[in-house]
Amino acid sequence: MPTEQSSLPIALTMGEPAGIGPELIVTAASARREAAPFFVYGDPGLLSDRARRIGLDLAIVETDEAGALAGFARGLPVVPLANPAPDQPGRPDVAGAAAVIESIERAVLSVRRGQARAVVTPPIMKEVLYRAGFSHPGHTEFLGELAHRHWGHDGKPVMMIWSETVAVVPVTIHIPLAEVPAALSEELIFETGLIVAQDLKARFAITAPRLAVAGLNPHAGENGTLGREDNAVVAPAIARLRAAGIDARGPLPADTMFHARARQGFDVALCMYHDQALAPAKALAFDEAVNVTLGLPFIRTSPDHGTAFDLAGTGEANPSSFLASLALADRMSR
């Protein structure tokens, strides 16, 4: 029997209007028998136009949150936004930034109000949002602010890239590589590992999570000869994780962590910076990887790719990662 929570729909944000997000949404809606019920905060006219552009005969059902489940049986349920979204595939416009932000805010609020059970976010174009005054480095940090605003939650949001092949977490995310050593601290690594382990237990049903922790430097510093950070910062954080009862191993040389045999030894790789984590994840599972935000009081997933302006409106965008995002949000919220 489904629980009351699992019978709720999933809330989708619109994503960047000029990117491939709208067509990923209408493509998923056209195959809705294979997906958990969802609705989207978006522009009904834009979504209808994008469906026509890529040759889909899809009913757009304007609704409110209460009518979303009934609307899903007939087509794509769309809760209209107050802000306009320019309908120009491949040509991002700052005029659509307010709609993008509104869509994210309302989707998160729908979970807080018990109208949805999870949030799935198509890709946004941060540079466009910055020009409109957006002050957060990215989606993850903005979701952390919304968690504080609506739940009073002050925990750290953690980005995990997940697939059946490999799962990775970058300890530092959207900062220049030159700033990474100063940004790393024993406390940051420990706190990130703690959140990862807790959510793997609570939301992925992994009873004893295994964390492989990468060193910052080549060869994990070679005992200090290639950098002091691994001995001085990373190793003490791992010791604290182990003292907290978490199976954490390292610091490990990042260049040997991701071959097939090595991956069998861990559930998640904890990496020190963005590309150390995302390069192997995208190489191994580009079409299936999902961006999951851990450490929040609500579930959020997203496809692990960008806006792909060159593909917008062509019907050539691969929906695999987006469909995987929907499936994972469904799995986690059950």
Image: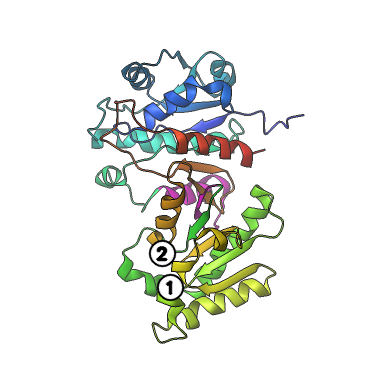
The residue wearing badge 2 is 273
Q: Earlier in the sequence, mark 2 or mark 1?
A: 1
Residue 146 within the magenta-colored segment of the rendering:
yes
Name the residue nearer the viewer: 72 or 145.
72
The residue wearing badge 1 is 216
Specify few, some or many for label 2: CA neighbours under 10 Å numbering under 14, 14-19, or 20 or more.
Answer: many
Residue at x-position 40% and y-position 71%: 183
Residue at x-position 54% and y-position 57%: 154
Element on which disc 2 rests: loop
Is residue 157 among what the camera can see? no
Residue at x-position 60% and y-position 59%: 264
Q: Residue 47's spot in the image, x, y percent? A: 37, 22
Mark 2–mark 1 distance (CA, rounded to whole Å): 8 Å
- From the viewer's perspective, is 142 left or right of 269? left
Q: Is residue 302 above or below residue 293?
A: above
Q: What segment is highlighted magenta in the picture?
A: 139-163
Q: Amino acid at mark 1?
A: Leu
- From the viewer's perspective, is 151 left or right of 43? right
Specify few, some or many for label 1: CA neighbours under 10 Å numbering under 14, 14-19, or 20 or more.
Answer: many
Q: Name the quarter where the C terminus is drawn.
A: top right
